Amino acid sequence: MKLRQTNLQKLRSTTFDALILGGGINGAVAAASLAAKGTQVALIDRGDFAGSTSSSSSNLVWGGIKYLENYEFLLVNKLCKSRNLLMQSYPSVVKEIRFLTTIQKGFRLPPFFVFLGTILYWGIGRFFTKPPRYLSPKNLKIMEPAIRTDNVAGGFEYSDGYLYDNDSRFVFNFIRSSMDNGCVVSNYLESIGSERINGQWVTTVKDHTTGEQFEIRSKALINACGPFVDKHNLATGQTTAHRHLFSKGIHLVVDRIATSPKVLAFFASDGRLFFVIPMGPKTCIGTTDTQVEDPEVSITDEDREFVLDNVNRLLELERPFTRDDIVAERCGVRPLAVKGDNNEADWLKLSRQHAIDVNNKDQHISIFGGKLTDCINVGNEIADIISGLGITVPYPKNVWYGEPDKAAREAYFSQASAMGLDSITDSSSSEPLSERLWRRYGQRAFNILKMIASNPDNANILIENAEYIRGEIELVAQGEMVTKLDDFLRRRSKIEQVISRDEIIRAPGLKEACRILFADKADDKLSEYIRSEKK
């Protein structure tokens, strides 16, 4: 909370080279790129960072295999290159995962023909992953007994990328990186209007924690508001070549289904892709793909029934899943970039390709569409555009993404080994503690080692069944601008995605976690969380 107050004062008193509106994946990488290259930049979000679409994805980092059906080879090539770069740059975070895909009898294409598409996909991906394999229904059943094969004509196995932790944590780490390089950020700070005055932008903002309003000044304005880009452009009088259509997607989180650590991929009853995705001790199932007019979306009973009906139809379960089995839900819109007034009758064929519109005269940038896989490209493009607007980028060749170098990694694991860190890993954990801390916090994991060395209790898990130790919560409290309890439980961590809300509230360690995060405001923040509606 102190960090946020300090940043609010800086936002009032500084004229920035660029102000970024929106702390989703597009805004986060724009901030990380510009800050690392020496630009004086600020970022605000009307809610929490990664609070909308960027915390409701499938956690998949994929090269867009489904776009092959529409012959979008250049897009697939670009996404595969981006996927490979992310896997190379974040080997602890973005890992290769195998997909088991089944083709039902009567599908619009023969199974072997679809399999040939995976061979092409592997080639376009520069053979970066393990090769695909064709599988008979019998072999599919052997590899994953949960798959129902009585109506399966064939299938295959191929590879793509997967976020080992969660999407919002990945996005926030770009925010944290930008802060380390001087970016001034704040959550719960909404732009309620921006004007171009005397050659600079004056943005009036409202602090949703206090109701206070003040102004932020910047040379350039970057609209990275995700699904709300069009709304802000309308308010500021910006005319753009692109605009958004919206597709609502939902996922349901249930207890673990499959025995293999693979993604099960199917075509749902309406012909769209449907995934069963491992999530530690849980499984994430979905998604829907429903056109909506408004970016403010919520899960309906119809959405739940669609997902539950499909998983019950496609898998051989001990008993059918019902709503009582839902541990958590994920809901968001995919902002799909379209050009001009084209309403795109066949909107299901729209890709998640990003588009960036620039008003050179006003030094205004709008980012449309996009997906996590393509995030490094967005960050690089924004830095080039800012430079093209005549704003100084002092260190244009600085690399702004990627995990710490090999020497830092080796030093960390050497220190963790000397401490015997993995020997004190909680018995319920799914991986060694040293690996988990490095993946989540990188260089900052050294700080947790110091905490544990000074007090071994910092290695204890506070919330039962949640793989987060006391030292992590201490680190989050110091530098991750947690303003509400939900910020930690849902976005800095994935606790709310693997443990039911009722179980979290009953957890004996929750009050202690609140005390660490909020000090003397702990009781108020806990009460606020308990009163809030389940999202």
Image: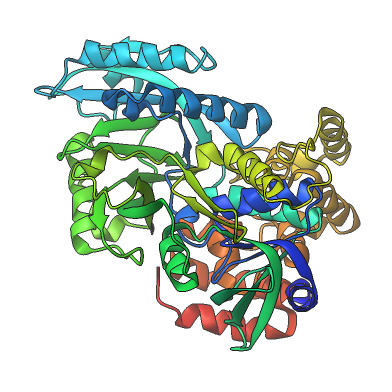
Q: Which residue is drawn at 58% across and 46% down?
A: 428
Q: Examine the image and state in which quarter residue 199 appears.
A: bottom right
The x and y percentages for residue 217 are 71, 72
Q: Which is more toward the observer, 243 or 130? A: 243
Q: Is residue 227 above or below residue 145?
A: below
Image quadrant occupied by the C terminus: bottom left
Q: Residue at x 30, y 56 (%)?
A: 325
Question: Does residue 148 appear in the picture of this structure?
Answer: yes
Is 328 left or right of 387, judged from the image as shown? left
Q: Which is more toward the observer, 22 or 449? A: 22
The image's colouring method is rainbow
The x and y percentages for residue 291 are 24, 53
Q: In this view, does 245 lie above or below 346?
A: below
The x and y percentages for residue 382 are 63, 46
Is 271 left or right of 407, judged from the image as shown? left
Q: Examine the image and state in which quarter residue 219 appears.
A: bottom right
Question: Does residue 498 appear in the picture of this structure?
Answer: no
The x and y percentages for residue 51 are 51, 62
Q: In this view, does 51 lie above or below 498?
A: below
Q: Examine the image and state in which quarter residue 264 appears.
A: top left
Q: Which residue is drawn at 40% across and 19% down?
A: 158
Return the residue found at the far left.
106
Q: Disc count in the image?
A: 0
Is 118 left or right of 438, judged from the image as shown? left
Image quadrant occupied by the N terminus: bottom right
Is 258 left or right of 524, judged from the image as shown? left
